Amino acid sequence: MEKTNTAGKSEKRKRARYVLNVEKLNHLNEEERARLKKVTQEYAFRANDYYLSLIDWDDPKDPIRKLVIPQESELSEWGELDASNEGAITVRKGVQHKYGSTVLLLVNEVCGAFCRYCFRKRLFMNGNDEVQYDLEEGFQYIQDNPQVNNVLLTGGDPLILQTPKLAKILQRLRAIEHVRIIRIGSKMPAFNPYRFLNDQTLIDLFREYSLPDRRIYLMCHYDHPRELTEQSREAIRRVIDAGVICVNQNPILRGISDNPKVMAQLWNELSFMGVGQYYVFQGRPTVGNEPYEIPIVEAYQKVEQAKKLCSGLGKRVKYCMSHESGKIEIIGVDHRHIYLKYHRAKHAADEQRLLVCHRDDKAHWLDQLKPVDGGANKYYQVDQSDRHYLN
Ligand code: SF4
């Protein structure tokens, strides 16, 4: 069994201190720091001493290290800045609407640390202007769209916001009658559990606004069981105790989250804590992410191997690709074909659509797959005029 990190169990640290410069990484030598500095001039670096303490610095392949410490291979020319074309579903500044019932609000552009593989790393780049701090336009958009029954706060990490600011957002959303679920996408339970342990007003806020039939969901982002430290488990205990539903979602990444035994350990441990594994995502072909990419077939096989090691509650997971056209579940692979199905679709014509493609063991994204009925993959290329939402 993968070793369980107990970092912090004996530590008495009360808060995480941010590390914003690779030159401060004392575990690396001067030459390494200079090389990585070049990477961070392209893709921002951010960590904190709590999360860095989880790294086994003697292991150059340590998964936590890979998650947060830059690699020079990020600089290879590969991928796109906005691989799922979120720009096309941005209906107001900082407001995304792709599926009828769900609206995303991008409420900030900072996280507890920066995952090297982030598909929204464009938000952390100089000159980016996608995030909206004044959310009134977003609230009005949601108010005007009664089919929206759930709103996802994202970014960046919404829980970086000060609690009073978060309180105003929750209060405003709760005032909109048709918004039943408020989701908060956050890696703070992994990156900085002190956010929950040190701020009782945050827990009280969750308790106030997560109601029996109008819940708050915390969409956690754990990638590896070593992130489940005592502090992190305690953070989740407090959040669940406040009436929040916790689930987990994370991408499958080379060297970080692609070991079936470790994946199963994560899913099982989370299920013991009351946190269901919701999605495993295929990595989006985002700039800088080549070192983390895994082909679809390999990833599918690893997810299936991991499932064999889980109870039913541990493996309530969907392995999906967040494609421009929708959330597509990879439901099967045989010696000739890859079977996929739209779980959520941007266009109504694709809703629940089954796709059968020729097996390609190198393909890592839908656009590289060839459908069995010949020609280019045009399943999702529906005219925009077709766009209408289903609840
Ligand atoms: S926590 Fe999420 S938004 Fe922040 S860097 Fe990681 S993947 Fe990106």
Image (cartoon, grey):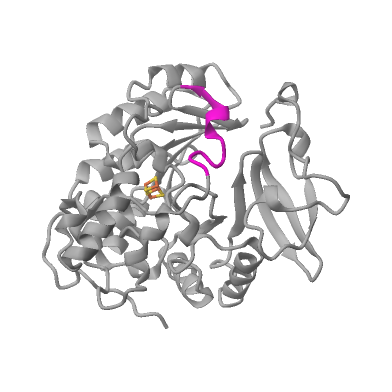
> Relative to residue 32, is residue 99 drawn left or right?
right
Which sits in the foreground, 321 or 278?
A: 321
Q: Position of residue 212 (x, y in %)?
A: 46, 41
- The residue sitting at the bottom extreme is 1
Residue at 46% of width from left, 46% of height from top? Answer: 119
Which quarter of the rendering shows the C terminus? top right
Q: Is residue 279 visible?
A: yes
Question: Where 243 falls versus 161 (above or below)?
Answer: below
Residue at 76% of width from left, 63% of height from top? Answer: 359
Which sits in the foreground, 324 or 196?
A: 324
Range of residues picked out in magenta: 80-92
Q: Is residue 90 magenta?
A: yes
Q: Is residue 303 magenta?
A: no
Which quarter of the rendering shows the N terminus? bottom left
Dividing the picture into quadrants, the one containing residue 348 is top right
Dividing the picture into quadrants, the one containing residue 304 is bottom right
Q: Position of residue 286 (x, y in %)?
A: 50, 47
Give the mark count: 0
Q: Position of residue 256 (x, y in %)?
A: 43, 66
> Relative to residue 122, is residue 87 drawn left or right?
right
